[in-house]
Amino acid sequence: MTLGSSGAGSSVVVPRNFRLLEELERGEKGIGDGTVSYGMDDADDIYMRSWTGTIIGPHNTVHEGRIYQLKLFCDKDYPEKPPSVRFHSRINMTCINHETGVVDPKKFGLLANWQRDYTMENILTQLKKEMAASHNRKLVQPPEGTFF
């Protein structure tokens, strides 16, 4: 555990695994209206690296009613650095590599401007908002049920 300087403005940095346990607990409880969720891929992975996220497409968009699966990978330097994020379900969005499904950090502001207190929940929620953005909401989509 890293402690900040003593006195006013001191801060405690929560260790990686404690942080991920908090995120796991929150992901298992369900988030908001239930259109975004996430959990660990392998309960036996003591490093808590591999996660699956789900986003249900927002109303009044070409994504409405679609269920998108994503893979998030939290390397050893998470949360100092963002996880890698990749759509498993095929999707057409301006911030997604059309060949691999990888969310391009340069084209997705939350990853480009990552801060330690951001979470996987923030990523999924922001991706859902991005689906509803004017430049993505009407893009022609691949057939439902296809994968990268």
Image (cartoon, rainbow, N blue to C red):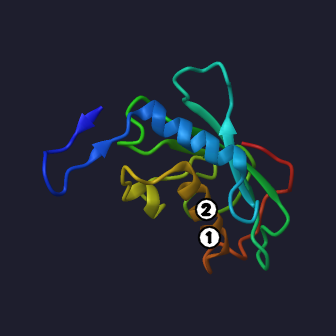
Tag 1 and tag 2, C-beta contact below 8 Å: yes
Q: Residue at x 54, y 42 (%)?
A: 22
Tell me if residue 31 comes above or below residue 64 in the rendering: above
Location of the N terminus (image quadrant) = top left
Q: Quadrant of residue 16?
A: top left
Horizontal and vertical percent for residue 132?
67, 74
Left or right side of 59 for 111? left
Q: Nearer the viewer, residue 141 or 67?
A: 67
Q: Quadrant of the C terminus?
A: top right
Q: CA distance from mark 1 to mark 2?
A: 6 Å
Q: In the rendered image, which quarter is residue 15 located in?
A: top left
Residue occupying image coordinates x 71% and y 48% = 29
Residue 92 visible (yes or no): yes
Label 1, residues with CA under 10 Å away: few <14, some 14-19, many ≥20: some
**Amino acid marked by disc 2:** Thr
Q: Is residue 64 left or right of residue 148?
A: right
Residue position for label 2 = 125
Image spot of residue 41 (x, y percent): 68, 30
Crowding at mark 2 (Cα within 10 Å: few <14, some 14-19, many 20+): some
In the figure, residue 31 lies in which quadrant?
bottom right
The numbered mark at residue 20 is: none
Q: Position of residue 69 (x, y in %)?
A: 73, 47
The residue at 79%/58% (across/down) is 142
| Nearer to me, 25 or 66 | 25
Q: Which residue is mark 1?
A: 129
Q: 69 left or right of 76? A: right
Residue at figure coordinates x 55%, y 51% from the top left: 103
Amino acid residing under circle 1: Lys
Where in the figure is residue 57, as x and y percent of width and height?
76, 65
The vertical placement of 119 against 93, above or below, is: above
Q: Helix, strand or loop at disc 1?
A: helix
